[in-house]
Each structure stands twice: as C-alpha cells, then as structure tokens.
Image: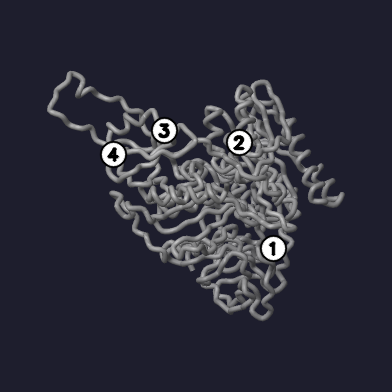
Amino acid sequence: MSTAASTLAEAPGATRRGGDLRNVAIVAHVDHGKTTLVDAMLRASGAFGERAAVVDRVMDSGDLEREKGITILAKHTAINWHGMTLNVVDTPGHADFGGEVERGLSMVDGVVLLVDASEGPLPQTRFVLRKTLLAGLPVVLVVNKTDRPDARCAEVVDESLELLLELADELELDETMTAHLLDLPVVYASGRAGRASRTRPADGDLPDEPGLQTLFDVITETVPPPADDPDAPLQAHVTNLDATSFLGRIALCRVRAGVIKRGQQVGWCQADGTVKTVKITELLRTEALTRVPTDEAVAGDLVAVAGIAEVTIGDTLADPENPVPLPRIHVDEPAISLTIGINTSPLVGRDPHPGTKLTARQVKGRLDSELVGNVSLRVLPTERPDAWEVQGRGELALAILVETMRREGFEMTVGKPEVVTKTIDGKLHEPFEQLSADVPTEHLGAVTQLLAGRKGELVNLVHGETRVRMDYRVPSRGLIGFRTEFLTITRGAGIASHVFDGYGPWVGEINARLRGSLIADRSGAVTAYAVDALSDRGTLFVGPTTQVYAGMVIGEYTRNEDLEVNIVREKKLTNMRMSTSDELVKLTPPTILTLEQSLEFLANDECVEVTPESVRIRKVELDSHTRNRQRSRAKAAAG
C-alpha cells in the first residue's frame, strides 16, 4: 500500500462512524457565487499548501466551464475542518444541467442555498430549491455578496422565505416541514472575501466576522450526520462517473448501507434487473481536490470505485449474498431536441485543420458514450441512418455537447433546435418556461414587444428606480433565438434567465425571426469587391478569402425573405485607366457567430455545419431549384 493510503488508513477518521461527517450540496442560480464560496472553504481549511498557486473557481476544471464562467458538471470535494469532514458537492446553477443537480442531491443530507444579496431568488433558484424540497433535505440560506454596492440583504431574505412558502404550498408539504423552513438558519457571506456571519451587515458591507467559522458551524448544526446503517448489508449507489488512463472507468458512489472494501466481491445491480458478481480492484476517498487510496468506506461515505468497466449511473453495488438494488435516479424529461449527423457539406474535411472523426459510426459511438454519464440526455433514431435526434433540457446543454464534440475532432451537421411535444388528453401540448428579465427602464417597451411576438404572458412586473423586473410565462419555442435579440435591443444591459415550467396547450405558430438569409449562389472564395457591393443588403457573416459554397448562408438579409447573392464576384478588368480605379475600399468587419448564436439564428430550413475550425450556417437543401420547388409545394399545401 502507498504512503498516502497507509496514512489515511491509520488516521482516526479513516473509518467514519458517528457525527464527524457531513454531506452537503451547494445550490444556487447561475453566477451567485457557489464555486467561489467553495474556493474560500478550501482555503479556510488549509487544503492548499502555502506556496500553491491557486486559481479562481478551482472546482470549474473543464475548459468550457472556465471559458463560459459556469459550472456544467457536479463535482465533489472533501473539506477537513477541525476534525469534521465535509463532503461538499458543487452543483450547476443552470436548469439545462438539471440532471447534474439531481445527481448531486442524491449524494447529500443537506443543502446550502446561495442567493445573491442584490439579485435575490431567480428562476433557477426556484428550480434547485424545488428539487431540494422534493428530496426532503434541510436548508441553510446563505446571502452571498453582501459587499455589493446594490446589496439589499433584508429584502432578499424575505423574498427567499416567500419562495420557500410558495414551494411548500405547491408541493403540499406537511406543517412540520413548513415550520422548519420558516425557521431555517441564515448566514451572510462574501465568498470572495472569505467571510461569513449570522449578523446581517449593512447593505454594501462585508460580514463583521473574519473567516468562515460561522458557516462551518451552521452547516454542522443544521445538516445531520448520515443516518445510513454501517451494520446492514452493503448498498452503494452509483451517482456519477469518471475515468483515468490507469484505472479506467471509475464509479462515484454514496454508500447507503454496510461497508465496502478494496478487493471485495460485490453484487452489481444493473438497470435491466440483472446482477453480476464483480471485484472492487481499487477504492478511493476524496481529500480536498485529490483522490487517495483507502482500504474501506462505511455507510454515509462518498467514494470512488474502480474495477467495473461498464458500470453506469443509477446502478447499485450490493451484498452479493443479498443484492437489493436502490431506486434509479429520476430526472426530468428533456424539453428541447436537435438533430446531429455527419457533415454532408462540400467542404467536409477540407479545412486547414480538418476534423478526424467524420463517419456515422464515430458520431453514433460518441453520442452513445455521452448517454453513460449524462442521465438527462436521450438519443433517438431518425429517418436517416447517418443522423440522430438528441433530446436534452435546453439549448445550452445541447450546444455544450456539440462544442465538446467539435473540440474532440468531430465534423457534424446540426439541425435547428425544436421542442419536445406531448399529447395530453388528445391535445397537443408543448413545454413552457418561466422567464425573468431585468432590463433598464428605457428598454421596457422593446422587450415587451419582443416577448409578445413570442407568445409570452406577463405574470409580474416590478419597477425600480432605473430598472424593471419582468416575469413571463413563455413557450419554450419562443425562447429559441431569444437571447441574442434580447441583448441587442437592450444594448447588452439586460439580464434574462428562465427555467422549465411544465407543459401547456400548443399556442400556435411563432414567427420569432423577422429577417431572411443571404445565401451564396456558387462556390469559391469571398472577394472584397463582392463584400463591398453587398454591404447594404444586410449583415455579413463572412469576410474576404473565406471559402463558401452554393447554399451556404453568408449573412442576414434586411428583409423578411431569403436572397441568393454572388459573394465571390471579382471586379472586371479593362484596358482603361481611371484616377479612382485603385481606390481603397473600407469594409465593415463581418459578424462572426458562435456556435450558440448560430443555433439561435437558424430558420426551419437551415442547419449548422460544425468542424473543429469552423461554424457555418447552411440550407438543409443546398440546390436552389430544389429549395424553390419545396417552398412552392409548402405554400400550395398551406393555401
């Protein structure tokens, strides 16, 4: 056994029984400071060495998480505080990653609810809090960022309690649990400053107590130690997956009963009801940000198990003599879908740095592997053998999947996001979202008009001195492509977030896009001469020397129709000389769309070509004559 393993095995807490362990999740709306607070807790516990170079948001280890500034995957760390071990699960705040939240909650015995001292509870706060109450977990309310100049701590606490009561009534909780919610402990904190206190500071000030002792004390008092029975037959629930090049697939488990040991034979209970006897080849416990070997773990522990090559989330590791599986992890149904298939454009594999994974077999294999660790995703066949319908919680979650695949070397064709409909009582129903928009007062009319065109229903309106808070119920279809237009009309000053709000009757046609596309009518390299000539026709997405092909969307037209243009036209040469013939042309730089913006831009007959180097919008049918015939047939059928 390694030195680290022997040290851990001999330590007093190596086999934990009793009250020296707490399992807690930190939940909040996006950007309310969860990951920053976990950083502060790790620093306070001395998890980082004195000379260690510590980056901000250390738990957001993925490239996409750091680039976007959000948590995508739920992660677990263990904090040692004066003999107490706190297993802390950092969860995503975006509802699109709700499957990660649900998995995180299945691992813990209590929740720290983080609320921004200025923004207060927002739609995703409601989402994560609802999941917490459904799980019956105790809550610690932490009002974070009290040092913001616009902090309003007292009002935020009142709003949080009102939300708790509203959810308690909605979920029909009993009076005892409702009373506990009203009496929940409140901590005022600044994660960035590493301070926390029970005493409410003046708005805009830091908490009056240095350090995070108060936060640790409140968590210890409020969150109960695991009630799991270490003397019962083994039951360990697989809640997440990881992998290393040395150990292969690793199952992250919450031990619900009994004791699990390295080298032990266990019963592997699978989704189809079969039970296989397998051996635990390695057992790992988390210490701060690293995993170290350990000989055993008992009921209540969170551990990593190696040795089961095909284990999946929701499986149970049980006593082989008495293999009783635990209930599978339940997640909400997906609401948004898009089609992912092989790249069928004329430029497939022709980028300067082309993708290396181009075949249908490779794309399907990657989507199947995503299903292993993403419980909120669905992959369904389509009429085409080289394309599949992928269903998820929202546009962002699906865009993250596509972005991850392109960085892995895939080239794909991605369709327009659509909603997943249901038939209820013989009538077509579609998903709806609860949208909260915070905008400057001068943009109120424009935002109201925008949402009215997307079938939004105003639920609440709160006027401030300079800003307005609006709550809407909007069909999920109406929010496809909403974000870009919203930021444009509010000049980047608007803040909007939304969360799934159930299904409702189909509201009819929504014409969210008011402008058409500029379409290249031939292949070639874009010329400056053509760009200058077309600059008044709309917003261009390509610049000089860019390779285009017939049927590729090269810009947004100023009118509500499509226009085919020659973007590769060259200036004709003559034998006449003029004083202005070589005059320099000042070109407007093209608008380069990101993958998410491209998906939002799509019309019904468009898709996105995605490669490791490029994101190109194109028509599904590249041939203009075929497109015109299809359009004529559609008009005839509609008329």
Gap between marks 3 and 2 measured at Cα: 25 Å
Mark 3 or mark 4: which is in front?
Answer: 4
Q: Is residue 551 visible?
A: yes
The answer to which of 354 and 529 lies nearer the viewer is 529
Which of the pair 575/525 is nearer the observer? 575
Q: Along the horizontal axis of the image, is 471 left or right of 609?
A: right
**Residue that label 4 marks:** 568
Q: Quadrant of residue 114?
A: top right
Q: Kindly identify which residue carries mark 3.
A: 539
Specify the label residue 17 is tagged with. Answer: 1
- For residue 178, side relative to residue 242 (left or right): right
Query: What residue does disc 2 label?
Result: 496
Q: How is the image coloured?
A: one colour
Residue 189 location (% of width, % of height): 65, 36
Q: Is residue 601 left or right of residue 335?
A: left
Quick one: SS at disc 1? Answer: loop
